[in-house]
Image: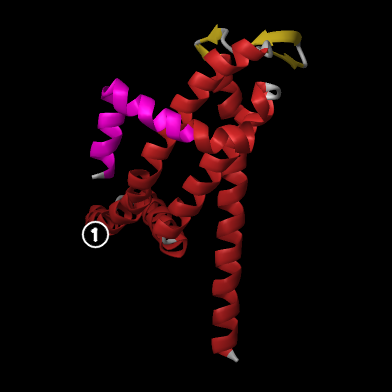
Amino acid sequence: MMFGLTLFVMIDENLRAAFVAGASAIFGPLIGFGAAYPVITILLAGSLTTTISSVLRHFFTDWVKMTRVNKQMGAIRKAQMEAMRRGNPGKVQKLRDVQTDIQKEAMDVQFAPMKSMAFTFLLFIIIFAWLSAFVYVDVVQAGHVYFAVPWQPNVDLRAAYGFPAWILLYSLLAIPLSQIVTRLLKFLQFRKRLAVLGAQAE
């Protein structure tokens, strides 16, 4: 249902405009700053979407199981190479059978995080649509379309470098934050799991 609604938002201009108007009513007063600080607005919008998507993906992902499956796959590949080097086709075939079983489990583990996309994809579409209207309308009207980077003092947010500069700026700010949030959540989960195992051992 969420993917269907997202598709309608992408196709139907009136529906997309309604969502953008709703997003403007919410995000405009919160992080719009009257279009005076567009870089900060883009940073905060990226932080919001990144944090939400990272948290949802974390709860849909069994990191412990994923780590175990990856370790098993790595060990099997190493054992296969060793068996092939020693010319033991029987062992290679047995390892392939084991690998097939583990690959099924690996597919389940890898597919699980994609379920979170059903909740985040629509949010990304709405945020990007709102940011587009924000940059090309509000920021232009406010006269703050330029920002500075180390190699150039004036970069137009609307300039195209394969993608519009504001999208590249969003990605530059959001992707590292996504990695930080994901690693922090994984660290907390593994530490909690180790604490539980330690308590059980006592």
Q: Residue at x 70, y 22 (%)?
A: 36
Q: Nearer the viewer, residue 103 or 127?
A: 127
Q: Secondary structure at mark 1?
A: helix
In the image, 92: left or right of 184? left
Q: Is residue 6 magenta?
A: yes
Q: Position of residue 108 (x, y in %)?
A: 29, 55
Q: Residue at x 54, y 81 (%)?
A: 197
State whether the magenta stretch is mostly helix, strand or loop.
Answer: helix
Q: Is residue 100 above or below residue 34?
A: below
Mark 1 nearby-residue class (10 Å; few <14, some 14–19, many ≥20): few
Q: Residue at x 50, y 48 (%)?
A: 52
* Quarter residue 105 falls in: bottom left
In the image, 32: left or right of 53? right
| Residue on which disc 1 sits | 101
Q: Is residue 198 above or below residue 144?
A: below
Q: Is residue 175 visible?
A: no
Q: Is residue 37 visible?
A: yes
Q: Name the colouring of the figure.
A: secondary structure
User: Across the whole image, how many numbered discs are drawn on residues?
Assistant: 1
Q: Nearer the viewer, residue 137 or 71?
A: 137
Q: Quadrant of the C terminus?
A: bottom right
Q: Nearer the viewer, residue 95 or 1?
A: 1
Q: Position of residue 193 (x, y in %)?
A: 54, 73
Q: Nearer the viewer, residue 90 or 121?
A: 121
| Span of residues in magenta | 2-23
Q: Quadrant of the N terminus?
A: top left
Q: Is residue 3 magenta?
A: yes
